[in-house]
Image (spheres, rainbow, N blue to C red):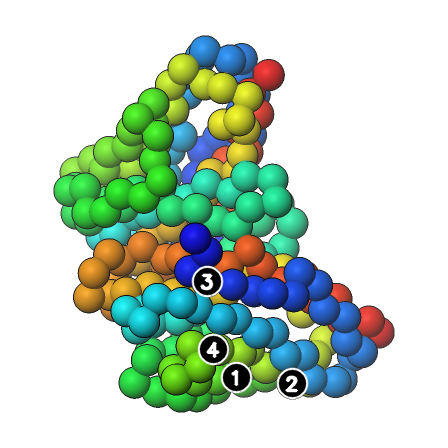
Amino acid sequence: DSGVTQTPKHLITATGQRVTLRCSPRSGDLSVYWYQQSLDQGLQFLIQYYNGEERAKGNILERFSAQQFPDLHSELNLSSLELGDSALYFCASSLTADYEQYFGPGTRLTVT
Amino acid sequence: DQQVKQNSPSLSVQEGRISILNCDYTNSMFDYFLWYKKYPAEGPTFLISISSIKDKNEDGRFTVFLNKSAKHLSLHIVPSQPGDSAVYFCAASDRGGSEKLVFGKGTKLTVNP
């Protein structure tokens, strides 16, 4: 158990819909990262927050957004969903950039 | 443009032997490298890391070697155990720039009893 929690574990929704994925980092970690793993793809970095502020952006679509709240949990919002958005979405946390990232169990999103 | 490459999609070894997983990178700004292990339906689990100021880091059965001039790192598992069977991801970051991890596509290791 990494100490990072993600909910829900599975999500099935239709095209055009909007969903919210939630992540609680390990106690004490200030950085939260979101990654997407599609079929046959490695983990692709989406976005990072540090202590409530956006720190870095990766290959995140404009239809996707995220935020980190004062209690340091984070939410990833995916809207106008397309079939190609079906993937595993992982959240990771670390104390700072100098420390390894610990991953949650992921949310499997299926868009039908 | 894949900055971190794991050229072997799979590797099979016998229990008790050495497993060597390889990783190449192209970005000379990377200064921190990590290996993660991933079982199906679980998140990646951190295994071991190495800073660019070192060329070797050891933790129990796991050793990571870094060759900066060749932009190559490897993970050695000795002795290999059936429970080591998983997908292994190499990752790199430029801690002076973006803190994101750039992952390879993974190598599936199978350790046969």
Which mark is on residue B4? 3
- Regarding mark 4 in the picture, which secondary structure is present there? strand
Circle 2 is placed at which residue position? Answer: B78
- Regarding mark 3 in the picture, which secondary structure is present there? strand
At x 56%, y 65%, the residue is: B6
Q: Which amino acid does the dot numbered 1 rest on?
A: Thr
Pair 3/2: label in front: 3
Q: Which amino acid does the dot numbered 4 rest on?
A: His
Measure the alpha-carbon separation of dots 3 and 2: 24 Å
Which mark is on residue B63? 1
Q: Looking at the image, is B18 positioned above or below residue A56?
A: below
Q: Earlier in the sequence, mark 1 or mark 3?
A: 3
Q: Which of marks 3 and 2 is nearer the N terminus?
A: 3
Labels 1 and 2 share a subunit: yes
Measured from the top left, where is residue A99 in percent x and y? 30, 67
- The answer to whether marks 4 and 2 mark residues whose Cβ atoms lie closer than 8 Å is no
Q: On the rendered structure, is B113 left or right of A69? A: right
- The answer to whether marks 4 and 3 mark residues whose Cβ atoms lie closer than 8 Å is no
Measure the alpha-carbon separation of dots 1 and 3: 19 Å
- Regarding mark 1 in the picture, which secondary structure is present there? strand
Q: Is residue A46 visible?
A: yes
Q: Is B65 in front, or is B46?
A: B65
Query: How many residues crowd around disc 4 within 10 Å: few (fewer than 14), some, or many (20 or more)?
Result: some
Q: Mark 2 lies on which chain?
A: B
Circle 4 is placed at which residue position? Answer: B72
Query: How many residues crowd around disc 3 within 10 Å: few (fewer than 14), some, or many (20 or more)?
Result: many
